[in-house]
Amino acid sequence: MSERKTPPEFESEAEERAFWESQDSTDYVDWERAQPAAFPNLKPSTKTISLRLPEGLLERIKIEAHRRDMPYQSLIKAWLAEDVERSRD
């Protein structure tokens, strides 16, 4: 097999993403020698959004979150993630 290419230096994550979306990684990586990697302390990127909810709905969510002993924002995220995962099946 020919020698592997060296990827360029990137000025931003967006530039790197665009590069890898348009390239065949086998030109740069020997996947036969690749090993699994684990990043147990890596937190997913988050983005703050504003969401308007009817007051009654928000109060019911807060009550349910209190019943489960968790922050209401975490409960909303969990419910959204579950629903999105279900809809992909």
Image: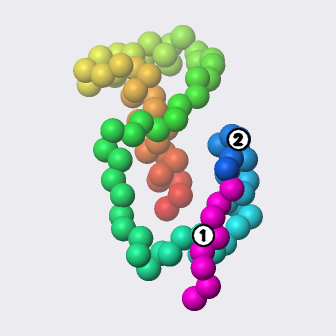
Q: Which mark is residue 85?
A: none
Task: Give SS at disc 2.
Answer: loop
x, y (%) of residue 30?
A: 50, 75
Q: Distance between the residues labelled 2 and 1?
A: 19 Å
| Amino acid at circle 2 | Glu
Magenta residues span: 1-8
Q: Residue 28 carries which label?
A: 1
x, y (%) of residue 70?
A: 30, 22
Looking at the image, is 62 positioned above or below residue 45?
above
Verify whether residue 88 appears in magenta: no
| Residue in the image at 73% along x and 53% along y | 18
| Amino acid at circle 1 | Tyr
Q: In which quarter of the image is residue 62?
A: top left
Please name whichever residue, 84 or 16, is drawn nearer the observer in this view of the structure: 16
Q: Main secondary structure of the magenta part?
A: loop
Left or right position of 53 against 76: right
Looking at the image, is 54 positioned above or below residue 13?
above
Query: Is residue 25 visible from the viewing direction of this image?
Result: no
Verify whether residue 4 appears in magenta: yes
**Along the polypeptide, which appears first: circle 2 or circle 1?**
2
Left or right position of 22 against 55: right
Please name whichever residue, 76 or 42, is drawn nearer the observer in this view of the structure: 42
Q: Residue 11 carries which label?
A: 2
